[in-house]
Image (spheres, grey):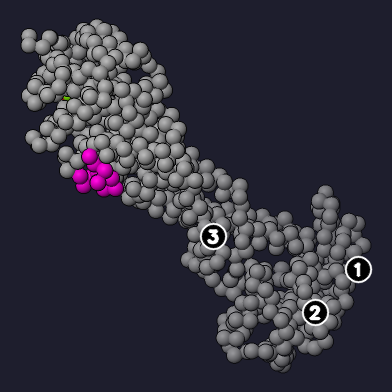
Amino acid sequence: MLSRSPFLYFLTLLLFKQKSKHLGIMSISVVMIALVSAVLFISSSLQKTLQDTLDEQADFTVTRIEAGRPVSTPLAWVDKIIEIEGVSEVAPRIHGRYFYAPGEESFLVVGIDFFDEQGSKALQSLLKGIDLKQFFAEESMIVGEGVKDFLQKHYYKDTFSFKTPRGEFKKVKIDEVLPGSLNLLANDMIIMPIGLAREIFGLKEDEVTDITFNVPNDAEWDNVIGKLHLVDYEIRVVEKREVEKAYENLYNYKGGIFLILYIIALLTLMLILYQRYAMVYSHERKEIGILRAVGWSIRDILKLKFYETLILVISSFVIGTVAAYGYVFVLGAPVLIEIFLGGANLENQVQLIPEVSFGTLGSLFLLYAVPFFAAVLIPSWRVAVIPPKEAMR
Amino acid sequence: MIRIEDVGKRFGEGENLFEALKSITLEVEEGECVILSGISGSGKSTLLSLIAALDRPSSGKIVVEGELVSKLPDLHASAYRAKTIGVIFQHFNLIESLSVEENVIVPLINSGLDMPAIRKMAEQSMQRASILHKASQDVASLSGGEKQRCAIARALVHDPKVILCDEPTANLDRENSLRFIETIQKLHQAGKTIVVATHDPLFEALPFESRVIHMADGMIGKHGE
Ligand SMILES: Nc1ncnc2c1ncn2[C@@H]1O[C@H](COP(=O)(O)OP(=O)(O)OP(=O)(O)O)[C@@H](O)[C@H]1O
Ligand SMILES: [Mg+2]
């Protein structure tokens, strides 16, 4: 086809023979696009994971407080909470951070009840595909990827010994490792049978860490909160919407940093486009005049410039975004991710799940392509309309 | 046939107003070879550019092959240049980054012909201009004479009826100049209408029939006056 269409042939000929002219602008564009889309990829991936995590969280979490400090929560509250109108899926939980002093790290230990069909939504999704019967048969645990790596570094291959508040050591078998895609949620997580967790945290039979439940009707929320305070004077209620707000604020704060990046990228784009704009008047003026002189119409010139720009814009955009995709989702966005998460530890060693917002990517393309086309087509048109004799001077 | 009627061309305005052409009237018959001679600044190039519709006259009219070229809108002016006119410019006006052949095909890109046909026409034209042996060489590395032959090949590639040459020998040595005159002679014999703007005395006594028109100060006089 290339050898058949004279226009396409000539277009590729010009691009190829004058590639040095486009190379500088192309490479800067590619770097800018890669940078901006990498940031977009990371943020949309994190946001998605965060949203998924929040979606799985219960609407309310309650704990008992003593002198303002959360302490063990009586299991008896469950029955009282179930009686409140509009409440559903009440689930007692045993969980907490287990600090491992020699390694200066802490894990999130979560106890689950084999007989409790409901469980928490979050846990259900974590435990998909894991043989629970086998798991509950012995004293074993399921660990996040980060925990596994950490334990291995400290020479715990198949088992780990927890130290209970009573000073005894509890040896627990490592049964299974959670997939890396769950890392934002579960990197530092250890899941074990509820009895085992109770032992490790030194809780009595009738005590749990906290109780979660849902209130499907939003309008009932404030009402429910009022009734909760009648259950017990020493109750602390955490609402999901508060957690959401906290995350949102954190996210917006990070967004500010990247706003600066966007502005820098935009300024760079303006600069290279100005250079491109000026180039038409300096280098391409005569060429346009020559083409006009040998019979090209203004339309032919604009068509040539349009397709030339189209090829450059699309190829640099594709190269930039594909590079960003590889950098973020294959390499895990080294360096940049630190800016997002503020230093790495077990808690936030995330594996970025590919999540591309095509809307955002489309806007980015327009933001890049429209000024680019303008920077080429406007001066080309202005040169093309002057008499060829003048343009060639 | 070219008919120029009372054509004037002014550049600039106000204090900078300059009349490059003042009331030019001239007829060139089909197949005729006309030499526009005159000192630098007399308006030769300006007149050629008006005939080629590369610019428009400020007054008067120009008719070429029955077409009123002084008033053509762009699309028609381009088509007119692409079909009727072949121009050999003083400074060649080639695209330096392209090869000889690639320069020669430029006028045919939007002609509707397919690539094989275009290549064939380019080859014939390069053959005629004796530059075929340099077809794939980049123009930037050619000598002056070779560049001009490339420019000739480009001007002739679409087989135009009217050929306009602006100072064709200004950048050539004597040998190349004589070669160019031979080329012009062949084109003349082929029945082309030719207008050459030059102040090279070589053109005062051509070995074939031609008419010399003297230009001075934007006006024309008759041969010998
Ligand atoms: N675009 C322009 N603006 C102002 N003046 C112009 C322009 N083009 C040509 N002129 C003037 O018109 C006059 C005629 O120019 P032209 O190029 O036609 O002369 P010429 O006879 O071809 O000269 P030469 O032998 O040097 O090529 C010159 O004085 C020139 O300065
Ligand atoms: Mg001149």
Q: Amino acid at mark 2?
A: Asp
Mark carried by residue A325: 3
Q: CA distance from mark 3 to mark 2?
A: 35 Å
- For numbered disc 3, what is the local secondary structure? helix
Q: Quick check: A95 above or below B48?
A: below
Number of numbered discs overlaid on the protein picture: 3
A26 displayed left or right of B24: right
Quarter of the image where one finds residue A284 = top left
Which residue lies at the image location 38% right of the left edge and 34% below the top edge?
Answer: B108
Judge depth for marks 3 and 2 and give the one in front: 3
A172 displayed left or right of B157: right
Q: CA distance from mark 3 to mark 1?
A: 50 Å
Give the x, y percent position of residue B167: 16, 27
- For numbered disc 2, what is the local secondary structure? loop
Q: Chain of mark 2?
A: A
Q: Evaluate whether residue A226 shows in this view.
A: no
Crowdedness near tag 1: few (<14), some (14–19) or many (≥20) residues, C-alpha within 10 Å: few
Q: Amino acid at mark 1?
A: Asp
Which residue lies at the image location 32% right of the left edge and 40% below the top edge?
Answer: B123
To the question of a shared chain for discs 3 and 1, the answer is: yes
In-front residue for pair B86/A383: B86
Q: CA distance from mark 2 to mark 1?
A: 30 Å
Q: Amino acid at mark 3?
A: Tyr
Q: Evaluate whether residue A37 shows in this view.
A: yes
Give the x, y percent position of residue B5: 26, 7
Q: Quick check: A169 above or below B109?
A: below
Give the x, y percent position of residue A17: 34, 48
- Residue for badge 2: A131
Q: Chain of mark 1?
A: A
Q: Which residues are magenta?
A: B130-142
